[in-house]
Image (cartoon, grey):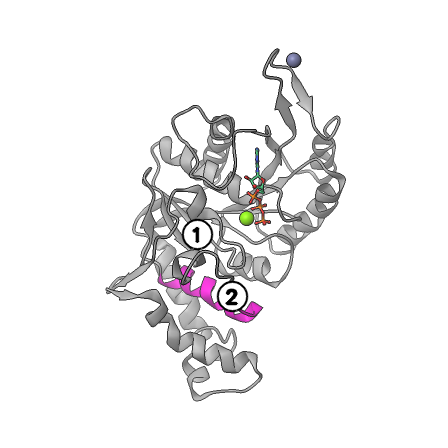
């Protein structure tokens, strides 16, 4: 086994010079060029790699900090508890959070003759994240966009997922180059859009809906996160942003609202998500996970 940093170094060096506008002899064989004769090879690798991955779903949002990573991890745990083989690709290179949420902090990816080997969470979810190739978790990934995209490309083309029923992809927020390139590169069954009911988050939902439609990626539905809190005394729903307007938004754009997730005060976000059934967050994602699984199985 060799470390992924070693495996990557050639591509990374080549891309550094690409980013500086210089071309290097290595560019001729660089899989990240995106144009020219080697593009089919790149696509072929992706198709081959993903041939044993039955369903691929990306979790997206118009705005940052609305709970994409939290919901990706919670859905992965639920779908795994439903008996499916699940992998999570953390495609947010600048803010990789999935390893923390699935109890894999500090884990390093290793390579084998079959490719990059994913790490396995305690609950059997396979995970690949850029955090697992960094020297330490508090070192920021100060790479330019094209290099971040190259790393995600490499993950998609070279990770040995084995047989999976579901691959969930946690994307960086917004409609910029990075989410766009992942959505173009991975043949997706669909996207799940996460929004809070704050007006700013909702404003940006329309952009992500339009992006998915432009790319002809099906929208599995909209999840409204942190929409309410349950009163600990009487169980009444306290709506944090007032009456929800997300349902009206979903109707306006003709996308299904597939569930709402309460704010879970016990979720600090820095620790591994508990799966003992006591987590309000994880248990409230169950019906959403069931709906997504049903939807995708019946589309196929
Ligand atoms: N339903 C919830 N209840 C309580 N806390 C939550 C909930 N959803 C998300 N959070 C918290 O909100 C913060 C942002 O969530 P998260 O990191 O999942 O968002 P994100 O959309 O992935 O952000 P980014 O755009 O930076 O990737 C985290 O601290 C997380 O723990
Ligand atoms: Mg995130
Ligand atoms: Zn009350």
Q: Does residue 56 show up?
A: no
Mark number, residue 89:
1
Q: Quadrant of the C terminus?
A: top left
Residue 148 numbered mark, or none: 2
Quadrant of the frame with the N terminus: bottom left
Residue 29 position in % (x across, y down):
41, 81
Up-down relation of residue 1 to residue 241 (above or below): below
**Is 3 or 219 nearer to us in this picture?**
3
Q: Main secondary structure of the magenta part?
A: helix
Indicate yes or no whether the magenta region holds residue 177: no
Mark pair 2, 1: CA separation: 14 Å
Identify which residue is drawn at 26% across, 62% down. Answer: 114
Q: Are marks 2 and 1 in contact (CB under 8 Å)?
A: no
Query: Which residue is found at the position 29% from the left and 51% from the top?
Result: 162
> In the image, residue 126 lies at what x, y percent?
35, 47
Label 2 environment density (alpha carbons within 10 Å; few <14, some 14–19, many ≥20) = many
Of helix, strand and loop, which one carries label 2?
helix
Could you tell me which secondary element the residue under label 1 belongs to?
A: strand
- Residue 166: quarter of image: top left
Residue lying at 59% horizontally and 38% vertically, measured from the top left? 221
Instruction: Identify the residue shown where x is 39% and y is 61%.
Output: 133
Q: Which residues are magenta?
A: 141-158
């Amino acid at each position: 086994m060799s470390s992924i940093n070693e495996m990557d170094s050639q591509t990374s060096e080549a891309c550094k010079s690409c980013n500086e506008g210089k071309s290097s002899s290595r560019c001729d064989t660089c899989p990240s060029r995106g144009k020219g004769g080697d593009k089919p090879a790149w696509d072929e690798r992706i198709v081959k790699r993903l041939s044993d991955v039955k369903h691929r779903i990306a979790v997206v949002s118009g705005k940052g900090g609305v709970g994409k990573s939290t919901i990706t991890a919670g859905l992965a745990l639920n779908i795994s508890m439903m008996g499916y083989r699940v992998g999570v690709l953390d495609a947010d290179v600048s803010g990789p959070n999935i390893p923390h949420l699935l109890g894999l902090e500090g884990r390093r990816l290793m390579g084998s003759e079959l490719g990059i080997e994913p790490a396995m969470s305690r609950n059997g979810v396979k995970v690949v994240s850029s955090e697992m190739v960094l020297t330490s978790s508090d070192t920021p990934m100060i790479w330019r966009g094209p290099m971040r995209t190259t790393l995600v490309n490499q993950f998609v083309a070279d990770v040995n997922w084995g047989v999976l029923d579901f691959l969930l992809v946690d994307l960086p927020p917004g409609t910029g180059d990075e989410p766009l390139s992942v959505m173009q590169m991975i043949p997706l069954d669909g996207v799940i859009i996460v929004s809070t009911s704050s007006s700013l988050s909702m404003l940006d939902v329309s952009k992500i809906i339009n992006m998915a439609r432009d790319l002809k990626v099906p929208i599995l539905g909209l999840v409204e996160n942190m929409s309410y809190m349950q009163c600990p005394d009487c169980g009444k729903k306290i709506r944090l942003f007032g009456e929800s307007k997300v349902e009206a938004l979903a109707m306006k754009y003709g996308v299904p609202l597939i569930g709402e997730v309460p704010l879970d005060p016990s979720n600090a976000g820095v620790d591994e998500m508990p799966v003992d059934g006591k987590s309000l967050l994880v248990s409230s994602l169950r019906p959403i996970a069931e709906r997504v699984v049903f939807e995708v199985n019946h589309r196929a």
